Amino acid sequence: MIKDWNDYSYLFDWELNAINSHQLGDYKAWLAIANKLGGKVLELGCGTGRISKEFAKEGYDITAIDLSSKMICEFRKNRKDMLIENIHCGSMLEYEFPDKYNFAFYSYSTFQYLLTLDEQIKALTHLSKFIERGGFIGFDICPYTCDLPIHQAKTLLYKRQNKDLGKQISMYTSHRVDRIAQITRWEDTYVLEDSQSRDVFRHVLSLKGVRTDFLEVLLKLCGYKLVEMYGDFQLNDVTPDSDNIIYIAQKIV
């Protein structure tokens, strides 16, 4: 059985903590950038609100959106300091936000889920309607998305106990890279087991490679200018070893 983001949502935050814990520091970077830029903030691809809730704690007027209705439902249940009317479920390609923002950001590689040039242009031009003139947008991009071997056969990535579910989870992953389209597709198999049951499902994930020179041209085409780059969540310079690159662009049209 193949599950989509809604069906996988109950594992999303747990798996992030289990195998990708370095990403958990990203909210500090986004907060530091927002502190410098000021104004209202919009998070695109908010998931269950891991980052937006940190902004709300700091008193920010933040709005958030995600396509997964189950993740948004979880977010609304645990929103803490955030107004429920600022939490939206919908597509970032077409959602009509109720306000304008000085800073919007695509968290946790969200922009890389846009797999075609048409989708990327549509996302940026649509977002522009809700960015104040002179406002800013940010991207968290994985620079080596398509630098992996062209094919990797199914491999055990981890085996861990999920205490909330009371199950041991084994995750097997495989991938294939399309060098021409610059898209990597992962097929992940999850085996959830306890003493009485065993459940198996697959989750498919595709990400688009986005390089700096391409992004600069794309931004210019859509009315933005690249103004800053950081090589990690401590906002250091970009290096050949950077696992994440944060780009900041300013709306100029």
Image: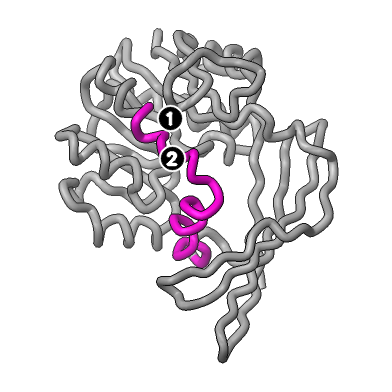
| Residue picked out by circle 1 | 126
Q: What amino acid is found at the position of numbered circle 1 in the picture?
A: His
Q: Secondary structure at mark 2?
A: loop
- Residue 205, x across and y down, in percent: 64, 51
Q: Pinpoint residue 160: horizontal percent, then vertical percent.
A: 57, 65
Amino acid type of the residue tagged 2 in the rendering: Met
Earlier in the chain: of badge 2 and badge 1, it is 2
User: Is 160 included in the stretch rendered in magenta?
Assistant: no
| Any part of residue 106 in sight | yes
The x and y percentages for residue 158 are 64, 59
Q: Is residue 15 magenta?
A: yes
Viewer-proximal residue among 94 and 193: 193
Image mark for residue 64: none
Tag 1's secondary structure? helix
Give the residues drawn in magenta, as a range. Answer: 7-29
Do the residues bearing badges 2 and 1 touch, measured as CB atoms within 8 Å? yes
Q: Nearer the viewer, mark 2 or mark 1?
A: 2
Residue carrying label 2: 92
Residue pictured at 30% horizontal, 55% vertical: 75
Quadrant for the N terminus in the image: bottom right
Report the label total: 2
Picture residue at 19% right of the left edge, 46% below the top: 82
Point out residue 26 in the picture as x, y percentages from the top left corner: 41, 34
| Magenta stretch, main secondary structure class | helix
Work out how far the residue at label 2 is from the one at label 1, CA to CA, in angstroms: 8 Å
